Amino acid sequence: MSTRTIARRAALAGATLTAALALAACGGGHSAGSGHDMPGTGAPASASPGASASFGDADVMFAQMMIPHHQQAVRMSELAESRAGDAEVRKLATQIKAAQAPEIATMTGWLTAWGRPVPSGGPSGGHLPGMDHGMPGMMSDADMAKLAAASGREFDRQFLTMMIAHHEGAITMAKQEIAGGANADAKAMAQQIVTAQRSEIDTMRKILGRL
């Protein structure tokens, strides 16, 4: 699959995501103590970070979509452990896994505290019923199978091309959270994702340029 094809698919998914988030924003926000579709009247002081703060539909969607998005990036990084031929690619994959696995745990904690469904892991990263709007940058099952079948330099080039598109998709979602989210912790993570993944994209493009 060409870089252009991946980029085009990511752009289309990003446009769909923008529309979905606009609809979510129209639905209004909630707070942990508002009583809107929430069990109980508030979160205990010992709850996970972000649990007792106000949140809105955009925050929930951000977490529900970013969890499977991160899960796929972690799986791609795990493939690199045994298939990558370039030492810098392996190092980058380890870095990506180390950064995104804890973020998955944090976002899972938020959704649990907010009383919202947590996406389950699946072949393509897992999703929730009814979440049929695309997640920008996500690879298909066929993409993942092709990556898993590659090794050495072929794997490195596929991994970098796919992960650049994947990161660009994550940045799109993170920017939407920064613009429309209500939860301070979720917005802070979104900014962290933008900063870290922009840097990783620059690194991946440099590696790809010498392979």
Image (cartoon, grey):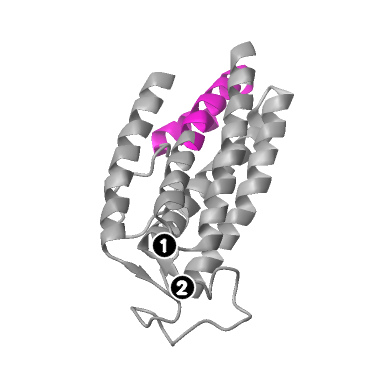
208 lies left or right of 14: right
Among the two numbered marks 1 and 2 on one chain, the one whose residue lies closer to the N terminus: 1
Between 74 and 32, which is closer to the camera in this rendering? Answer: 32
Residue at point 68%, 22% (across, down)? 85
Percent across and percent down for residue 61 are: 39, 58
State the predominant SS element of the stretch in magenta: helix
Label 2, on which residue?
A: 114
- Dividing the image into 4 quarters, which one contains the N terminus? top left
Residue at point 30%, 39% (across, down)? 15
Q: Under tag 1, what secondary structure?
A: helix
Give amino acid for label 2.
Trp
Give amino acid for label 1.
Val
Q: CA distance from mark 1 to mark 2?
A: 8 Å
Residue at the farthest top position: 210
Residue at point 62%, 32% (across, down)? 199
The quarter holding residue 29 reads: bottom left
Marks 1 and 2 close (CB-CB < 8 Å)? yes
Q: Which residues are magenta?
A: 140-167
- Determine if the magenta segment contains residue 143: yes
Q: Residues within 10 Å of mark 1 (few under 14, many from 20)?
A: many
Q: Under tag 2, what secondary structure?
A: helix
Label 1, on which residue?
A: 60
Percent across and percent down for residue 64 are: 43, 58
Percent across and percent down for residue 72 are: 51, 44
